[in-house]
Amino acid sequence: MEHYNTANEKIDDQVETLLAGMTLKEKVGQVNQKLYGWEVYRKTDTGYELTEKFKEHVQRWDGIGVLYGLFRSDPWSSINFENGIAKDSSAEVANMIQQYVKEHTRLGIPVLLSEECPHGHQGLDSMITPVNLGIGATWNTELHEKLIAAVANEIRAKGAHLGLVSTLDILRDPRWGRSEECFSEDPYLTSRLTEAVVKGMQGEESDIIPEGKMIAVLKHFTAQGNGIGGHNAAPASIGERELREIHLPPMKAAIKLGALACMAAYNEIDGIPCHANGYLLNQILRKESGFKGAVMADGCALDLLVPLTQSQEAAAALALENGVDISLWDNVYTTLEKAIGEGLVSEEKLDDAVRRVLTLKFKMGLFENPFIETKTPISQEQAQKINLESARQSIVLLKNQGILPIKGSNKKIAVIGPNADSVYNQLGDYTPFQQEGKVVTVLQGITELANDAEVAYERGCGIRSLDTEGIEKAVHLANSSDVAVVVLGGSSARNFDAQFDLNGAVINTTGEEEMDCGENVDVANLELGGQQLHLLQRIIQTGTPTVVVLIQGRPHAIPWVAENVPAVLSAWYPGQMGGQAIAEVLFGKVNPSGRLPVSIPRSSMQIPVFYNHKEGGYKRDYFDMSGKALFPFGYGLSYTTFTYDNLRCSIQSIPVCKLLAGETFKIMVEVTNKGDRDGYDVIQLYIKGKGSSITRRVKELKGFKKIWIAAGETKEVMFELGTEELEVFSSQNKYRIEEGCIEIEVGNPIDFVSADLIIS
């Protein structure tokens, strides 16, 4: 291997030096991510060995650009604790791969290892966190930055370099199976949490990624959460204004913080697939927004372009020409050498992609040292504390008629429901196999905190099974108990009997699975599945005080629950520490502080029901149903009460020119904890533009603060509104600040103070 790394040479110069000496075959190898990572090794009685398939791939292109999922574990990959890579062996296997490539290729260019980490790493012995909807419910960017930093530290210690993390999808239709991967239905909240991911995973922007950090591959770009009918990978039937107002902000925010990679989305926008959309990837993303990083394809997505082009070579040329730098498992990019030879695309276009890939490798410091220390320390205790706190803050109290916290006078507690003691049901999709005792379920959490109370459990029913056999036992238990905690919801848990597509998405289920959420598991009906509602109705009929805990990957339509159950918690998929966090909230050891990151509908028939719809003077209600959400975006109760007073602004009116020069509206409000419990409040700032060249939304989130307020304490909170918050994509298709009145609301969706500001 030749050496291309010198201490005083800039990365750009090093990249050009290396690129100039590469053959066409070697260049094609650098943009291919063809292999499934679990195909490249074999576990033996004495350790691990590399497979012939891996060695043949290295020889075919004289190197490897990126290798996906070396450590992945799940039913699709069929990797578990018997045949997978144990945590303490991960660095060893990663180093084996780098050593082989170094010794068996002409240039010895190191390999980028990419890993899935949508809610913790999808590898054995990994920390599994709340899913993104739960993180969105925390409304706590500082906490999530710490959590994602702990995840990055863990994955980097195993030897990986790229973390594939969902941040960019905006949830506009909760029927979509991948709802759990979204932070929110709102672009502002999603943008702030995306920033937290970039800072937590990559660290401060610099030439070299710091030790213990890695590169975030932000997915999916873009508008995948707006698929028609809630179908996975369906076309997004939106115009450019909707694209720019709702779906682009998270990526634009990430770019400002130095984002280095993103993944293109499966969907098309206005007839053009994202993987073939040069206007999206080259014009908007790169030229307009200043993105300098690499664009990775989604799994097998480039093969989906073949019907459009009628040949693999033409599809490869189309994707490369329009801005895709790295493939994922497809056959299309393996034909790039032939496509260039036939004149379908220029070698200069390939060079651009290779530059971006090599830049990532230099930024990770791989040319200086491609190996990972096998004893990199990780503070497991600190990471678990952050994970637990994230689970606590993700829980949203939707209703409480005095039943919570559970009182110590209750001598017998019934824990009932399909999600009360199901490990995988509380972890979400993209989850690795778990060691026994690694996950705290709700039943375990309640049992641990119940003190002298007797805790008894009955499953009652399944998630979507129509079997009623267990209901009578559950009803009998509730009838003989002082309080019943009924844990319902959904499941994204996969099993070995399901059929999987080439990209790992579920194709069909056998009928035995309880899975009703996750990739490719879209639903038409948002009500609780199977016999869950029937089970709950029978328990309510006993007269036993009842709490419903919803563990779910999407907001379910729960009108009967909301009307008839005295206390309701939404816990999303809370991760490994979820059972403890839920129990702490139930017993009052933790004051719930989650707020809804997405509107909860009354019915699937209302969809869409997101809060920030356009103001057009049309009737929102239906003839046969309210058009309003059952629980609105931003909603969430506490065991205490917060009030908002003395709203004031530093200045009532600011000219456009001064806003453009950096001046801001400074908005102050006093928040008082009127109750007898300390707790967090989430103070939200919304605006509504009056007088504009375009139809404005009924309201738009433009600021939030999560603060701890002691019982009886008053704190002043300040927000600023400037160019970024106030500009619109105008009728002239340009970003601009328009003169007019801005109505502001500060507080929460059901209790707020308001004022008007003038842009002159």
Image (tube, helix red, strand yellow):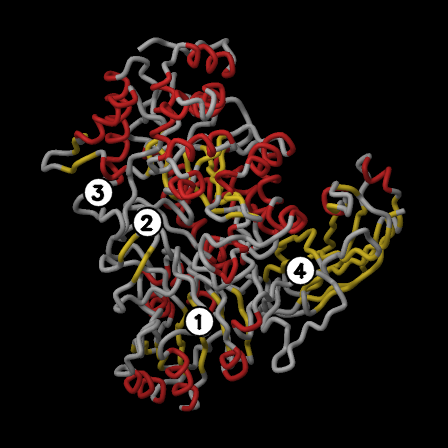
Residue 415 in view, yes or no: no
Q: Residue at x 54, y 39 (%)?
A: 277
Q: Amino acid at mark 2?
A: Gly
Residue 624 in view, yes or no: yes
Left or right of 265 in this view: 335: left
Q: Amino acid at mark 4?
A: Asn
On the image, numbered disc 2 is attached to which residue? 504
Q: CA separation, marks 3 and 4?
A: 45 Å
Indicate the secondary structure of the residue bearing disc 4. loop
User: Which numbered disc, 2 or 1, marks the residue that appears first in the sequence?
Assistant: 2
Q: Check the image and report above or below for 363 versus 718.
A: above
User: Which numbered disc, 2 or 3, marks the residue that appears first in the sequence?
Assistant: 3
- Which percent across, then down, holds residue 189? 60, 51
- Residue 84 disc label: 3
Foreground label between 4 and 1: 4
Q: Amino acid at mark 3?
A: Gly
User: Which numbered disc, 4 or 1, marks the residue that appears first in the sequence?
Assistant: 1
Q: CA separation, marks 1 and 3?
A: 34 Å
